[in-house]
Image (tube, rainbow, N blue to C red):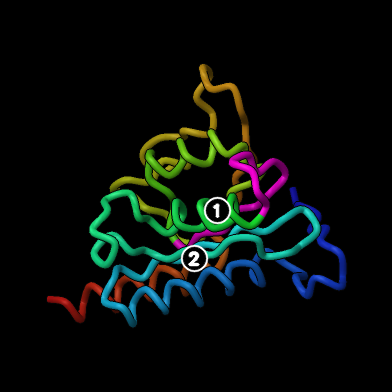
């Protein structure tokens, strides 16, 4: 089943790939700062970027400073509300359980991720947190968007560290 992409033409976003490219920009910034290259953006239903984030746990000395959390914090400040209904969070790597929990609490409408994470992925790889029956919010999940490019950025980063 093919999903219909429906941002207004004026947004400049025509596909999930366009959205993921914005997250990849954030991932590259993280890499330049010596962090694991993971990036995220939060997009409003109208196609406006309301939040940006990149991995920053080293610089922030904060174990919760994942790209998704940073993007959610930025978006909440931008819109003036901790609830972000009908937004889309795009991230270059499948989120962990902590980040999935934050998205549920923020009421994100859709998660779009790039590379799957077979070690800690909580959007389908290790577990499907979005489908846990006791949660009071459901979000749509679209995975594998520019997965090769997102995964290659991480592989190159870790290879350079060995």
Judge the density around disc 2: few (<14), some (14-19), many (≥20) Cα neighbours within 10 Å. some
The answer to the question of whether label 2 and label 1 lie on touching residues, with beta carbons closer than 8 A, is yes
Q: Position of residue 54 (x, y in %)?
A: 42, 66
Q: Is residue 153 above or below residue 66?
A: below
Residue neighbourhood size for the residue with mark 1, other residues' Cα within 10 Å, grouped as few (<14), some (14–19), many (≥20): many
Q: Position of residue 126 (x, y in %)?
A: 36, 39
* The magenta segment: 79-92
Disc ID at residue 114: none
Helix, strand or loop at disc 2? helix
Q: Which mark is residue 143?
A: 1
Q: Which mark is residue 147?
A: 2
Q: How many marks?
A: 2
Does the stretch in magenta take in 88?
yes
Q: Residue at x 53, y 22 (%)?
A: 135
In this picture, residue 107 sits left or right of residue 68 = right
Residue 32: where, in percent of width, then height? 33, 82
Q: Position of residue 45 (x, y in %)?
A: 77, 53
What residue is at 51 percent from the left and 62 percent from the top? 40
At mark 1, the secondary structure is: loop
């Amino acid at each position: 089943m093919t999903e219909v992409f429906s941002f207004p033409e004026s947004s400049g976003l025509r596909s999930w790939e366009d959205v993921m490219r914005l997250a990849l920009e954030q991932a590259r910034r993280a890499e330049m700062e010596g962090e694991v290259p993971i990036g995220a953006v939060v997009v409003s239903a109208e196609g406006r970027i309301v939040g940006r984030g990149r991995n920053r746990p080293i610089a922030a000395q904060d174990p919760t400073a994942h790209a998704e959390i940073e993007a959610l914090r930025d978006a909440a400040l931008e819109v003036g509300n901790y609830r972000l209904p009908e937004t889309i969070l795009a991230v270059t790597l499948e989120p962990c359980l902590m980040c999935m929990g934050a998205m549920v609490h923020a009421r994100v409408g859709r998660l779009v991720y790039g590379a799957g994470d077979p070690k800690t992925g909580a959007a389908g790889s290790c577990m499907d947190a979005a489908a846990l029956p006791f949660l009071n919010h459901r979000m749509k999940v679209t995975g594998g968007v520019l997965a090769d490019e997102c995964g290659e950025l991480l592989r190159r980063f870790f290879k350079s560290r060995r």
